[in-house]
Amino acid sequence: MKAPPCTRRQFLQNTCLAALLCLLPRDAPGGSTPIPQNQELTLWYRQPAPDWNSALPIGNGRLGAMIFGGVNRERLQLNEDTLWAGGPYDPVNPKAAAALPEARNLVFAGKYSDAAKLISASIMAKPLRQLPYETVGDLLLDFPDAAPVQDYRRDLNLDTAVATVSYTANGVKFTREIFSSPVDQVIVVRLTADQRGKISFTATMKTPQKAAIETEMTGGLKSIGKPEPGKELPVMLVLRGTNGDAEGIRGALRFEARISINSQGGTIRTASDSVSVTNADSAILLIAAATSFKNFHDVSGNPAPIVARQIAAAGKKSFDKLLKAHIAEHQRLFRRVSLDLGASPAMQLPTDERIRNFSQGEDPELAALYFQFGRYLLISSSRPGCQPAGLQGIWNNSMSPPWGGKYTININTEMNYWPAETCNLAECVEPLIAMVQDLAQTGAHAAQAMYGARGWVVHHNTDVWRAAAPIDGPNSGMWPTGGAWLSTHLWEHYQFSGDKAFLARAYPAMKGATLFFLDTLVEEPKHHWLVTNPSLSPEHSHPYGTAVCAGPTMDMQILRDLFAQTIQAAEILGLDADFRRQAAAARARLAPNQIGAAGQLQEWLEDWDMQAPDIHHRHVSHLYGLFPGHNISLRGTPEFAAAVKKSLQIRGDQATGWATAWRINLWDHLADGDHAFEILKFLLSPQRTYPNMFDAHPPFQIDGNFGGASGIAEMLLQSGGGEIELLPALPKAWPDGRVQGLRARGGFEVDMAWKDGRLTEAVIHSLAGNPARLRYGSATRDVRLSKGKTFRWDGR
Ligand code: FUC
């Protein structure tokens, strides 16, 4: 067989992977536009998805689908990122302010369970739970019985963001190509065959929502492709509904999903709620969906004209044009980073088999695929103007997903954005930044009404309505530091870009987050340190029957970061000298990091760690200071870094998906890439990775995917405090490799190549003109690059 031309990008030339790729057989999908196949960037399977966690995700940041690829029935489970239950609501408990002083006293008196009871009775939000993210429903395409089928293949190309299903039945090769376009705001489905007149199917919809499904025949649209005269009837399948009620809050959203169905050749018939296409040469479906959500306090939008406009505009374009624009926009972000960890024969196997084998065999390329899948998921679930990625990104098939599919901000939402800046997807952070701006408003009400404080506060969760009050119960909800943690992402965004105009826009939210704590920190009786009270170390019960306590280590670490960042931002912007002094004075009085009797970093003010009922708890909140925080580092505070290591050893390596991913990032920052790699093997095993590569908490939670991608990036590059460290935690398992396009704080883009475990070349591009110290092992090099300039270094 003649080898197909190798189109791999230049950076891979001369590597073993590139050589192998050129020899790999590739299936050319049917249809007029063969989509380029990038085997090393493709998830693929030999069978349809038996369940949701095997289906393949596509998304344009807002509009998502899970594709099952059934031969007789295709199922596209659809999501739109503003379709949540309920409507705007105020969850603040009016009794909270009066109860807070007593709760504080009980905590300082060591009566933790009594404090928890009081918090439960008087401080928790009403309703006690926030509102869930909901599915739109399914588009179902039923095909005539095709058995027996040969050469079945289902794939997702991360480089093009196109999912393809292909198979041969009765000598006819059928192909489905599906993508969610960020340019045209529709999902496009094309059905083709390599013989004429072979496309027949019936399209219906199904939804658990209160909704009506009907068909419409619409004139006046131009057809797509080259239809036969008189056969170009654009027919619509329309789902109109209202969102669910939940927790006593009535559904206030209207939504509409509109699907146009157009065929080339054949006939189209409509029934009341289904559309049938018979004996067509090909067919194209365009799917649009929108809700009346305008923002967290305004649901007065009208989805009908929005989806009608989107369908009409996309319907005027050819499939090729839609596809080209989609791929170009996706690749603008996706292709900024490439990663080659070396190839092995395993990469010729389907993805589900590779996941089964990863921990036993040699398949470095699967780690690179997992890394790029994380980047793909962020691009697909968090584009500017959209909602941030929730616990499941934008993909959810239920009316009541696990934990509401919400924004859990005591780790999960933050973890979603760990790879964003380092992996060159800064734009994808914009939805998170916009959410922080919203929360600064709802959180100001919570701060005032609950604590009588200035600034703003959010506890451990929020939803699309930006609810800010403590929920679920005292052991998880009574944590006032969620907004503070989120605010550190504003500073990180500035750190990576050096964009002062952005910093000026972000500063009021950072200042508000700080002000809340200036007003609410209290002096603890023993050492007179300033602490949060009541608070908790996320979801981890101490030995006294509850998690509720004062001054957990994580709070102090987050506030040390937040205060330092806010002070620095104010200095850069030349603002608020008095406030800066107050923040600095309070920061100096925060309870310090402490090392306990077991040599561990103490999780609480007291040395309770070894008596806690679950010493292997999934959360490692007190280790925030090492990663993602900036309190502790291997070289800056070696004694605390050693204590972090001890804490990690006590906690153990295996936990839920996201908690496993956090441990990888922490070992990276202890410069132990081999230990991190051992944990990555567990994360990338069927216990923590579903066949579609979604992370298994279990159940599916996307944070583990993002934390895992970050864990791989942090093996290769770390930055902070003016230093950029090259290959700080390279595992022995990846002796040779290349990475291109990672980002470092201070405004740098970094490419690296290594051989036999040693850096051979690093190329540093300056984006902001800042000075930097490069580090490789014990070698350092100070560089002063003007903006746009490049420096090459071999680490010697
Ligand atoms: C936190 C975690 C759980 C889960 C939930 C969504 O409560 O402790 O493990 O990830 O968020």
Image (tube, rainbow, N blue to C red):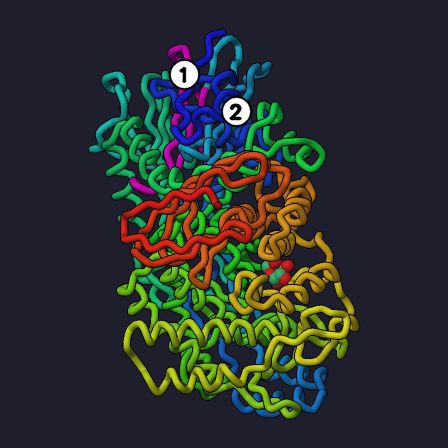
Q: Residue at x 68, y 82 (%)?
A: 117
What is the x, y in percent for residue 574? 28, 77
Label pair 1/2, CB-CB below 8 angstroms: no
Q: Which residues are magenta?
A: 175-204
Cβ of disc 1 within 8 Å of ligand 1? no
What is the x, y in percent for residue 275? 40, 30
* Neighbour tally class for label 2: few under 14, some 14-19, many 20 plus, Cα within 10 Å: some
* Neighbour tally class for label 1: few under 14, some 14-19, many 20 plus, Cα within 10 Å: few
Residue type at tag 2: Cys
| Residue sitting nearer the eye, 677 or 79 | 677
Q: Which residue is mark 2?
A: 16
Asked whether the viewer can see residue 247, the reply is no
Residue type at tag 1: Pro
428 vs 412, left or right, is left
Label 1 or label 2, whichever comes before in sequence order: 1
Give the total of numbered labels: 2
Ligand 1 found in image quarter: bottom right
Is 201 a magenta residue?
yes
Q: Which residue is mark 1?
A: 5
Is 585 a magenta residue?
no
Q: Residue at x 51, y 83 (%)?
A: 588
Taking 589 as reference, is 486 above or below it?
above
Cβ of disc 2 within 8 Å of ligand 1? no
| Residue sitting nearer the eye, 75 or 44 | 44
- Real-space Cα distance between discs 1 and 2? 16 Å
Depth check, mark 1 against mark 2: the one in front is 2
- Chief secondary structure of the magenta span? strand
| Residue sitting nearer the eye, 707 or 62 | 707
